[in-house]
Amino acid sequence: MASSLTCVGVVWALLSFLCAAASCVGFFMPYWLLGSQMDKPVSFGTFRRCSYPVRDEERQATVMLEQCGRYASFQGIPSLEWRICTVVTGVGCGLLLLVALTALMGCCISDLISRTIGRVAGGIQFVGGLLIGSGCALYPLGWDSEEVRQTCSNGSDQFELGKAQSRTSDAPQTDTHIHRAPPPMVYYSTNMDTHSTVCGGTPASAHRTDLLPNVHKQNTQQIN
C-alpha cells in the first residue's frame, strides 16, 4: 500500500495519534481533582463531576449520589476559569486529533501529505499543545470555587489546595452544622461529615448547601 510518509513520518503519525488519544481521554475523564464530601470520594474534571449530594425525598435525607455526570449546562460549571479551560482544552484536543487522523491516513494514501502540508500539520499540533497547556494552567484558578472548597475542607484557593495529603487522609473528621432554608430546586446537607484526601486543609466551621444546582440529577450520565 502506497504511503506519502517516510519512516520518520510514520513514527510521527503513530506518536501523534497516541498523544491525541491520551489528551482526549484525559480531557473527558473527571479525575483532575480528588477530594471527599460526606465521607464519600469526590472527583472533578473541567465539565464533569463524580459523586454529588442530592435530596432523597423518600427518606427525607441528603445522600451522596456516587455516579459521574456532566453539568446540566455550560453555565453550571463552577467557575469562569473552568469554563474557559473546558473550551481551550477541548479545542486543543480537537486540533491534535485532526492532525493525528490526517497523518494516519497519510500512511495509507500516497501524495496525501506533502512537505508543505506536513509543516502546516506540525504548526497545528504546536497550537493544539499550547492550548492544552494553557487549559491546564487555568485549571487551578478555579480551586477557589465553593464546590471545590466543600470537598477540600474549605482550605482551597487559587493554586492552593491547603495542606497536601495523600489519597487516604489522616486529617480528623469534623461534623459541621448549618441551618438555612433550602434553595428551590436542590437541598444538599445540614450535617456534613467532611475530610480531605488529595485536597487537604483544615475543616471549615460551615459549608454551603446551595451548590451544584445544575448537575443532572435524573438519568445522570455514567461512566460505563
Image (cartoon, rainbow, N blue to C red):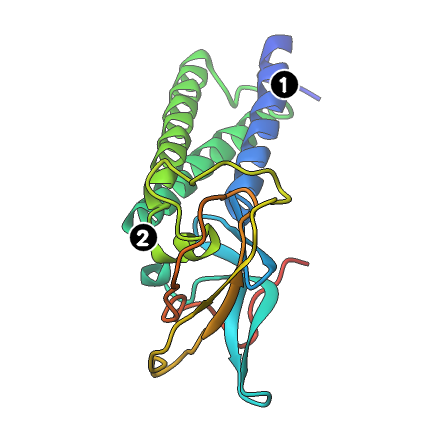
From the top left corner, tell me how far across and down residue 130 is, in percent: 37, 26
**Considering depth in this image, is 128 or 187 the residue closer to the camera?**
187
Q: Are marks 2 and 1 in contact (CB under 8 Å)?
A: no
For the residue carrying disc 2, how many other residues have a C-alpha within 10 Å: few (<14), some (14-19), or many (20+)? Answer: some
Q: Is residue 193 left or right of residue 119?
A: right
From the top left corner, tell me how far across and down residue 12 is, in percent: 58, 17
Relative to 216, say whether 171 is above or below.
above
Q: Of label 2 and label 1, which has the lower sequence position?
A: 1
Q: Which amino acid, by three-letter code, is at mark 1?
A: Ser
- Secondary structure beneath disc 2? loop
Q: Which amino acid, by three-letter code, is at mark 2?
A: Ser
* Tag 2 residue: 79
* Tag 1 residue: 3
Relative to 134, say whether 179 is above or below.
below
**Considering depth in this image, is 154 or 210 the residue closer to the camera?**
154
* Corner quadrant of residue 123: top left
Q: Is residue 79 left or right of residue 111?
A: left
